[in-house]
Image (tube, helix red, strand yellow):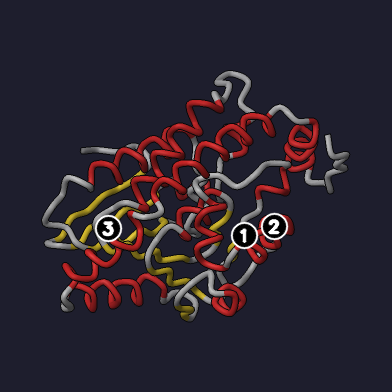
């Protein structure tokens, strides 16, 4: 299958999914969200594949949602449709019967960070910029950001990270337990390939079975979180704080939020 915003390569038991909008730092527009969801759902039927490596083309993994697309008056964003695609994406990733590895360089922000956190193994370069920064434009995390953060660091720390929108480098993220390995600049993909090769030379079928045992019991919780994220995001998109956050972003100024 040919994609507009992605490439998907299959090499033996390994698949490589590349986010491919480098001119936009792989910011996710509606097309990319749908294509990632389609690709991940399609991989569920690829019984011979056992490891999936996800990376970004160009200068970043993904800068998150495409704010310019959010503001395009000629093609208004249908938030309910978008949240449907984002929910498909997150559920397909979490339930995928493969070991998933994220190779992170540059920015992994917002929805891009949710995608990273949904992977089984996260390898990031030391100068990466990782942030759950929805709060900066008056939104809540989506793409199961609440769920994946809670799984990684627990509820109290998840709240702090979401509310602050703090940007973390690789070492900071590793210290918090958000990622699994930090590498030197320019080395994340190389290390991800080595990790993939190690899994493929291990009893990976048993490892995948363990993943499914641990994940299956939480799928209903994931579905509830996705439904809550979708309804909350729809509400937040209509808030005055979100409109102010978007306007401030465009005007390159500090937003003036009023809790409305």
Question: Observer-nearest residue: 223 or 30?
Answer: 223
| Above or below 106: residue 245 | above
Q: Which residue is mark 1?
A: 131
Q: Nearer the viewer, mark 3 or mark 1?
A: 1
Tell me the distance, in whole angstroms, between the alpha carbons under discs 3 and 2: 29 Å
Quadrant of the image containing the C terminus: top right
**Tag 1 secondary structure:** strand
Q: Residues within 10 Å of mark 3 (few under 14, many from 20)?
A: some
Is residue 162 rendered to the left or right of residue 100? Answer: right
**Tag 3 secondary structure:** strand
Is residue 3 rendered to the left or right of residue 247? Answer: left
Q: Residues within 10 Å of mark 2 (few under 14, many from 20)?
A: some
**Which callout, 1 or 2, points at the residue further toward the start of the chain?**
1
Taking the spot 73% from the left edge, 41% from the top edge, the residue there is: 138
**Which callout, 3 or 1, points at the residue further toward the start of the chain?**
3
Taking the spot 54% from the left edge, 23% from the top edge, the residue there is: 78
Q: Which residue is mark 2?
A: 165
**Which callout, 3 or 2, points at the residue further toward the start of the chain?**
3
Taking the spot 56% from the left edge, 28% from the top edge, the residue there is: 79
Tell me the distance, in whole angstroms, between the alpha carbons under discs 3 and 1: 24 Å
Q: Quadrant of residue 172?
A: bottom right
Taking the spot 54% from the left edge, 74% from the top edge, the residue there is: 177
Quadrant of the image containing the N terminus: top left
Q: Quadrant of residue 154?
A: bottom right
Question: Observer-nearest residue: 57 or 188?
Answer: 188
| Above or below 240: residue 59 | below
Residue 11 locus on image (x, y percent): 15, 60
Query: Total marks drawn?
Result: 3
Q: Are marks 1 and 2 in contact (CB under 8 Å)?
A: yes
Residue 217 locus on image (x, y percent): 36, 55
């Amino acid at each position: 299958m040919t994609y507009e915003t992605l490439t998907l390569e299959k090499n033996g038991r390994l698949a490589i999914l590349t986010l491919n909008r480098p001119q936009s730092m792989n910011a996710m527009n509606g097309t990319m969200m749908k294509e990632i969801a389609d690709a991940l759902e399609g991989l569920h039927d690829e019984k011979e594949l056992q490891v999936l490596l996800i990376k970004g083309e160009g200068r970043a993994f993904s800068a998150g949602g495409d704010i310019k697309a959010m503001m395009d008056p000629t093609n208004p964003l249908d938030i309910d449709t978008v949240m449907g695609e984002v929910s498909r994406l997150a559920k397909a990733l979490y339930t995928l019967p493969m070991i998933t590895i994220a190779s992170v360089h540059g920015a992994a922000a917002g929805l891009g960070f949710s995608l990273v956190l949904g992977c089984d193994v996260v390898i990031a370069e030391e100068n990466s910029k990782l942030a759950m920064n929805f709060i900066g434009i008056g939104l809540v995390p989506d793409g199961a950001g609440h769920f994946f953060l809670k799984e990684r660091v627990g509820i109290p720390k998840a709240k702090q990270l979401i509310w602050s929108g703090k940007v973390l480098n690789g070492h900071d993220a590793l210290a918090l337990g958000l990622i699994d390995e930090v590498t030197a600049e320019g080395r994340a993909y190389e290390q991800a390939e080595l990790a993939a090769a190690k899994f493929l030379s291990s009893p990976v079928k048993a490892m995948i079975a363990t993943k499914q045992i641990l994940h299956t019991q939480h799928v209903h919780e994931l579905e509830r979180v996705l439904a809550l994220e979708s309804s909350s995001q729809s509400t937040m998109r209509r808030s005055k704080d979100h409109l102010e956050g978007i306007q401030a972003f465009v005007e390159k100024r500090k937003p003036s939020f009023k809790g409305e």
